[in-house]
Amino acid sequence: MVSTLDLSRWQFGITTVYHFIFVPLTIGLSLFVACLQTAWLVKKDPAYLRLTRFFGKLFLVNFAVGVVTGIVQEFQFGMNWSAYSRFVGDVFGAPLAMEALLAFFMESTFLGLWIFGWNKLSPRLHLATIWLAAIGTSLSAYFILAANAWMQHPVGYTISPVTHRAQLTSIVALLTNSTALAAWPHVFFASFLITGGVVIAVAAWHLIRPRAASAADTAIFRRVLRAGLGITLAAAVATAVTGDIQARLMDSQQPMKMAAAEALYNTESPASFSLFTIGSLNGDQELWSVRVPYLLSLIATLDPHGTVQGINNVERAYVKKYGPGDYKPIIPVTYWSFRLMIGMGALAGLLALAGLWLTRRRRALPRSAWFYRTAIWAVVLPYLGTTSGWIFTEMGRQPWTVFGVLTTRDSVSPGVTPSSVIISMTVFTLLYGVLAAIATKVAFRQVAGGLPDETEHAGDQPLPVFTY
Amino acid sequence: MSLAAFWFLLIAVLWTGYFILEGFDFGVGILLPFLGRDNADRRLMINAIGPLWDGNEVWLLTAGGATFAAFPLWYASMFSGFYLALLIILVALIVRGVCFEFRGKVDSPRWRDSWDVAIFLGSAIPALLWGVAFANIVRGVPLNSAHVYTGNLLTLLNWYGLLGGLTTLLLFALHGAIFLSLKTDGPLRPRARALAVRIAAAAIPVATAFLVVTQVRHGKPWTDISATLAAAALIGAVVAARRGREGRAFLGTAVTLALAVATLFGDLYPRVLPSSTRAAFSLTVANASSSHYTLTVMTWVALVFTPVVLAYQGWTYWVFRKRLTRSDVGETSGTGTPALERQP
């Protein structure tokens, strides 16, 4: 019989990975649309208004799925992880409640104002609503990452001798956790990696179509394509730099995760970085690998000869500290997800660089269909990268939910039966599958519709732009 | 008042806000198949709550977050205990949330009809289940010595729980009908008002029965007063609706919901989740709350930011105060495809 623990872990994994398909595009596209609308207001070029509305509609489709799947996330802690919630609620509940009060209200309320306020608010005030919604979105991400950072690197708490539960001692420490301060920019820039990818794909899809509307629209989509390529390249560099900062924090805060990322079994100095390894499944035997000397030492410690601790060494130290047990995550999962994360991000960045080079001449666009096909399909790369990144960071923390404090095994709801979780997991998986199909269909229609007419918004009696 | 008692009050306020605000948009969703005679009517109804429903739903998320932060043991026992009931609510809220966004995006009657059914179910099911949940919380649920729920989904579907569910379902439908009579103009407005009076014929006896049973079983002197006032406000709302005083009628149903929530939370206090197994296993304001430090921090956050949230959400309601008509959703004549639904 499968256990409630395993089922709950799978359900949390499925629902969280799915939720995070939509979150980064919400973060990136809200700011992108806010910038487009600002450009329209400043330059008075109607092309910007048309783009604002075009990407705005796409943003709303994505936002809707992100919001509804986010409710599940908040409820799941109590439903499936009630032992965890009891133990850490005093600490972990605070950033979640703050997210709702400070960020989520802002995001939802001002987005409602933006969607329906086109003809009710002055242009400047209306512009302010999309900026506030976008800021709310990024702020929301910070609170969630602060909560997650506490699980990776618990700070500002004590274990109460009376209740034997975690108790907050410093909200400032919690909100300025070095892990959170490093994670937020990484997630923020990775969001733009996805946004850039989507913008590129949408523009390329329109440029490859021979019937692609007017020459004016083609010129607009060419600029959009270039913008998407620029965003992707910049985001790839920024994501790599912030990821590098995180790697060093991880090496000092969670040495097991660093070792597991590299499947480094024994301490090495200097340590090489393996690009690919073919080995036995549990990774303890290496058959063939491509290695870059000194690189792992450099990533983890900034010193090419620095020492990187191996899994076995960390394991011995943990057994001494936390008592007998197995403190290793599933090594093949951490090893490959770490590589996939870096590889996909780097590939997206390199393709964007190539794209910028190929489109460097004004007016002349590449003729080859392969250019556009690559531009469209490359959208999956950043999605695979962010998904792998979360799988790595969460699986790499195992067997802990709160590193060094509470294990995943001890976090699960004691009163929930496996059959209940089988029901909920099946329902969520099917529902999310159907939702993905419908959202994709609706999003494709929005994209295929092309740039909306700016005249729809002009005249004495302008029609509401976004009604349901 | 202790900080924990203050947070109990604050969570009661959050649920009150949620029931009043999401209550009317649930109501509009429930009435969609009954009041919306054609697509223009239905679009008018959906657009009446369009800018508001998402902000309304955040009251629930804030109530959930506040419970997690201030009463982790309450949050843990309730959410894991009501597992399958919450699953059904989550599915309903997910479906309903995307409905509004997706419905108008494809111009096909079949597409829209499917979403209309989904909006109805997505609104009616949570409207019913929140009542079931709260009735059961007041009644007490089987909790063992570790505060772990030992019942199942059927435990919650007792007659008192279902009476509570029927009460919220009818009250939200009534509240939604009155909201539509207040927020729209044209042929829908008198129809919504007339339907409100008909719903009231069921809502008044059901809600009164629920409040009477609640007070007889779990009542306190002061909640007897709030329950009586809730019933009086309900009757007042219906009288106002009959006389065409839509603003007063809406105020009446809002006050009814607020007093009903106050009655339930008042009956509950100082417990937060009573155990029907043994009174000593109950979760209370004292034994379920967070530490003094966390409550202090959260109190400051709430005191500073709640007024800000109320101000901008109130402003949203002010911006969208105008009554909507069929022409607002692009319908000029009675037939034909509305201009906005034509896809390029």
Image (spheres, coloured by chain):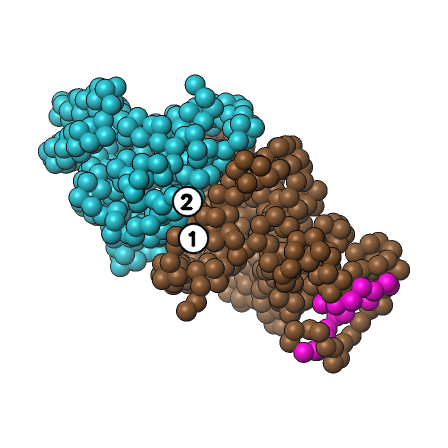
* Residue in view at x 75 percent, y 54 percent: A251
Quadrant where the N terminus of chain A sits is bottom left
Tell me the tag on residue A403: none
Q: Numbered disc 2: what chain?
A: B
Residue at position x 48%, y 43% in the image: A86
Same chain for labels 1 and 2? Say yes or no. no
Disc 1/disc 2 C-alpha distance (Å): 10 Å
Question: In which chain is the residue bearing label 1?
Answer: A
Q: Is residue B273 above or below residue B82?
A: above
Seen from the viewer's position, the closer of residues A363 and A370 is: A370
Q: Which chain is brown?
A: A
Q: Kindly indicate which chain is depicted in cyan in the rendered structure.
A: B
Q: Which residue is mark 2?
A: B146
- Three-letter code for the amino acid on which mark 1 is drawn: Pro
The reply to whether the C-beta atoms of the residues labelled 1 and 2 are less than 8 Å apart is yes
Q: Which residue: 53% across, 31% down?
A: B291
The secondary structure type at the circle numbered 2 is loop
First to last magenta residue range = A262-280
Q: Is residue A240 magenta?
A: no
The residue tagged 1 is A414
The crowd level at tag 2 (other Cα within 10 Å; few <14, some 14-19, many 20+) is few
Q: Between residues A354 and A212, which one lies in front from this camera angle?
A: A354
Residue A55, position as x, y percentages in the image: 52, 49
| Image location of residue A223, percent across then percent down | 64, 53
Q: Does residue A351 appear anywhere in the picture?
A: no
**Residue A119 position in % (x across, y down):** 43, 33
Secondary structure beneath dot 1 equals loop
Q: Is any atom of residue A294 visible in this view?
A: yes
